[in-house]
Image (cartoon, helix red, strand yellow):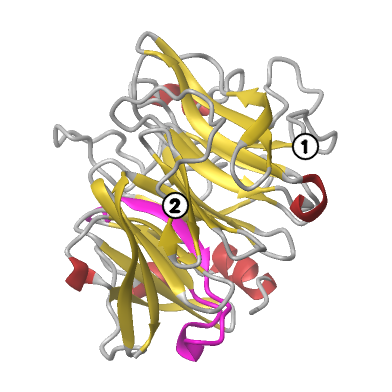
Amino acid sequence: MKKSSNLRLWARSGMAALVMLFPAGGAALAEPSASYQIETVAEGLAFPWNAAFMDDGTILVTELDGQLRAIRDGALDPTPIAGVPEVYRASQGGLFDVVPHPDYANNKLLYLSYAAGEPAANATRVARATFDGAALSDLEVIYEVTPLKDTPVHYGGRLAFAPDGTLFLTTGDGFNYREQAQVLSNTLGSIVRLNDDGSVPSDNPFVGEAGVKPEIYSYGHRSPQGLFIMDDGTVYMNEHGPQGGDEINLIEAGKNYGWPVIGYGLDYSGARISPFTEMDGMEQPLKYWVPSIAPANMDLYTGGLFPAWNGDFFVAGLVPGDVRRIDMEDGEIVGEEILFAELESRIRAVQAAPDGSLYLLTDGEGGKVLRVTPN
């Protein structure tokens, strides 16, 4: 894996170079980086959202409609996994992420994020449960975003464990509550950091500050759906802008990422949300897209099947529907390649598998799980 320390330094000092590298919409690389083939592993899924690769070779897939599915020996089990909590399924709400505990081999704990509640009062929730391979048991809700909201959109919902065992969760601004992303007495539009039982780590940046939610790790986010944590603990995320202004960010403890005070996009009406793209005390993105690509998750490729991709980030794009390879060389972003546009599908997730292949989840009713290998 490539080291991230150089990227951190460059991200702070090289923004002018970054904008030159990436004009509006991003600059695609001229030559294809690899030859590949795509096979269908599973299809007929109800809005697949994310996948987890288990140690025994099972692939767990969440469906936004509220079911957790298992792919075993290359085939989709027709029977959904039992014991999944009830979700609030409306618009963007439903079952989101699934991740195993870092010590899953011994404790068999799975973590789920999902929308919970009702139309007038709903929120992103995190639960953990014991998984025996067929069903969940001893389900325990360990966290819920506050306050409850009355919109079925902008939930965030991405989970990731850090090397120190803490659990990170992205949360959205609820769409109609964008200003709350700047208010630290709630957890809308934030990234929160928790212990594995849902309690607050004592070294979180705002612990002990009056009127501030101590679980907040960073704030000023709109609709963050991508999250990746490096082996050294460096945190990267991507988030949806409105019309333009989708971002990749380097996340640091206690920092303000600006939404909705600064940004590079327009409101859906065409109006300017803010006249500012930068402001003292607010972080700049590593990269932004104008027009939007509607980024879902992100992953880092470290496998051996595609040497040209090793150490590069991959970002799933819902609009127009492709995957962006963010080419990293010696800790710097040097290019962007558009991949898999030939599928003509909204890509909800892109994930590197333990065997070095790349998996894609297509969005929507009748969603597919696809596997990418060298041609």
Task: Tell me the residue that label 1 is attached to.
Answer: 195
Quarter assignment of residue 235: bottom right
User: Residue 128 location, x and y as percent?
Assistant: 67, 34
Q: Which quadrant does the C terminus fall into? A: bottom left
Q: Which quadrant does the N terminus fall into? A: bottom right
Q: Is residue 358 left or right of residue 256?
A: left
Mark 2 Cα shell of 10 Å, populated few (<14), some (14-19), many (≥20): few
Residue 221 appears in view = no
Nearest the viewer among 167 and 287 is 167
Quarter assignment of residue 56: bottom right
Q: Which residues are magenta?
A: 291-312
Three-letter code, disc 2: Asp
**Residue drawn at the location 63% of the way across and 30% of the way down:** 127
Task: Tell me the residue that label 2 is attached to.
Answer: 77
User: Residue 152 location, x and y as percent?
Assistant: 34, 23
User: Residue 144 location, x and y as percent?
Assistant: 59, 22
Q: Is residue 336 left or right of residue 354?
A: left
